[in-house]
Amino acid sequence: MLNTAVPGPLLAMGCFRTSPSHSWIYPTVILCLFGFFSMMRPSEPFLIPYLSGPDKNLTSSEITNEIFPVWTYSYLVLLLPVFVLTDYVRYKPVIILQGISFIVTWLLLLFGQGVKTMQVVEFFYGMVTATEVAYYAYIYSVVSPEHYQKVSGYCRSVTLVAYTAASVLAQILVSLANLPYFYLNVISLVSVSMAFLLSLFLPMPQKSMFFHAKPSKEVQKPSNKNGVLGEPQEGEAPGCKEEKPTSEISTTLENPDDGLLSSLKPKNLALRVFMQWFQDLKECYSSKRLFYWSLWWAFSTAGFNQILNYVQVLWDYKAPSQNSSVYNGAVEALATFGGAVAAFAVGCVKVNWDLLGELALAIFSVANAGALFLMHYTTNIWACYAGYLIFKSSYMLLITIAVFQIAVNLSVERYALVFGINTFIALVIQTIVTVIVVDQRGLNLPISIQFLVYGSYFAVIAGIFLMRSVYIIYAAKCQKKVQSSATSQNPYGPHPEEPRDVIMGTKL
C-alpha cells in the first residue's frame, strides 16, 4: 500500500523534500521497496534440489560439509567490521554493497559450477547477511523518534510478506507450471537487481548513531507510546535508564563547547566510541534479566540459523527431490505465516514476563527440542515438515518476546549495540557448532544425526531456563509471604508492593 503514495522515486524525492512534516515517508517507501525485492527470492526454498540436481550435480556431502559452512564462517568474520563500517559511512553505502552482493551471489548461482565456485557464493551470501544491519539501522538516521515504531513495523512486515509471497510463487511455479529450478534463480536475480537499483535512490543520511551524531541538544529518545522504547523496567542495568546516549557522552567528553563529534580527529573519535561501547555493554549486561534474555537469544538464534541452513538437506535426505514431489515452498510459506501469527499474538496476550518470561522460554524450547527430535526419528516427510512448522513458529514467537524485553530498557543507541553483540555471540556459537558437528575437519556427521545433536542442544537450553524459572517463581512466592507477614504484624506500615516490584528481589 505504501508504494501507491509515491508515483515514482524522482517525483517523490521532489515532493517530500519540500514537506518536512512528511520527510520520513520517502525514505520509508524506498526502504520498504528495497526490503520487498531483496526478499522476493523464490529460488531459496528449492536451493538444495537445484544444487543437487542436473544443473549443479553436487552431492549431499559436498553441500553439507564443504559449501554451507563457508556462509557461517564468512558471516562471523564480516559482521563486526561491517557493523562499525555501517555507522561510520552512514548506512547507504552498505545497503548498496548489500545489493551488489545479492547480484554477485545469484550470478554465480546461475552460471558457476563446482564446489569452489559455490563456496564463493556462500562467501558473498555471508556479505549479504552481514550487511543486513544497515537496512534496519538506516531508518533511525532519517526519521524522527516518534516514527521509529511505525517505520520499523513497515520494514519488518514487508520483508515477511515478500518471503511468504516468494515461497508461494515458487511452489506454484514448480508444482503447477513444472518450471525448472534454474528459472526460479533467474527470477531471484531480477528481483535483487531491482533492490540494488532502488538502493541508489535512498537519501544519504546526515547523521548516524555513533560516529556522526548530532549535537547533544538534538539527541532525544522516542516517546513511551512507541512500545519498544517505553519506560525502563525494574531490574535494568545502572545507567540504562537515564544514562546519556553514546553519541551524547562522546560529544561531551571531547568538545563540550560545540558538541560536534565530527570535530574530533578520526583516531580519537574511534577510540572514544569504542570505549563508550564497552562501558555501555558492561552497564547493560549487569542487568541480570537483560543478561539472561540475551543469553537465550544468542544460543537459540545460533541453533535456529543452523536449522535454517541445513533443513533442506534433511528434507532431501528423507524424500529425495529427484524421486518425489517437493513442497518446500509451501512449507516455508506456512512456517513464516505461522511465525508471524505467533509473533502478533504476543502483543495481544497480557503476561507478567518478569515472572513467567523464562518459564515461557523453557516451555517453548522444549517444543523446539521435541520438533527437532521428531525430524530426526521420523521417516515420513510430512511429519518432518510438521516438525519444522512447530520449530520455526515457536522460535519466532519467543524471539519477538526477547527483542521486546531487551529493547524496552534501552535507548536506540544501546539496543542497536546490544542486538549487534547478541548476534555476534550467536554467530560465534554457531561457528563452534559448525566446526564440531558439520565441517569435514570436525565430526563430519551425516545430516540425520546432526538433527539429533540439534534437538539435544535445545533440550539443554530448555533445562537451564526451566531451572531458572522454577527458582524465580519460588523466590517470588517466598518474598510475597515475607512481605505479607510483615504487613500483618504492622497493619499501619507500608502495604505490599505490586507483583512487578516483588519480583525485582528474585532476579539472579
Image (cartoon, helix red, strand yellow):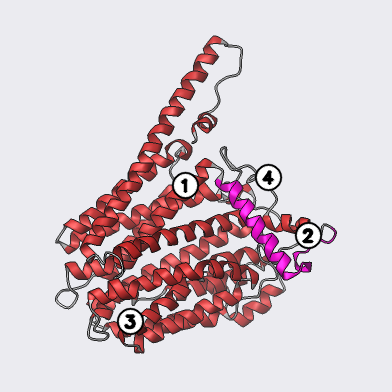
Report, in whole angstroms, how far the alpha carbon at label 3 lies from the one at label 1: 39 Å
Residue 275 belongs to magenta span: yes
Q: Mark 3 and mark 2 in contact? Answer it, CB < 8 Å.
A: no
Report, in whole angstroms, how far the alpha carbon at label 3 lies from the one at label 4: 51 Å
Query: How many residues crowd mark 2 within 10 Å: few (<14), some (14–19), many (20+)?
Result: some
First in sequence: mark 2 vs mark 4 = 4
Q: Mark 3 and mark 1 in contact? Answer it, CB < 8 Å.
A: no
Residue 227 spot, x, y in % from top left: 56, 49
Q: Residue furthest bottom?
A: 111
Which amino acid, mark 1?
Trp
Measured along the vertical axis of the image, is residue 56 above or below residue 464?
Answer: below
Which amino acid, mark 4?
Glu
Q: Which residue is mark 2?
A: 254
First in sequence: mark 3 vs mark 4 = 3
Residue at the location (24% across, 84% down)?
57
First in sequence: mark 1 vs mark 4 = 4
Measured along the vertical axis of the image, is residue 382 above or below residue 107?
Answer: above
Q: Is residue 346 left or right of residue 462?
A: right
Report, in whole angstroms, how far the alpha carbon at label 1 lies from the one at label 2: 34 Å
Q: Which residue is mark 4?
A: 242
Q: Does residue 11 appear anywhere in the picture? A: yes
Magenta residue span: 257-285
Q: Which residue is mark 1?
A: 293
Q: Which mark is residue 184?
A: 3
Element class at badge 2: helix
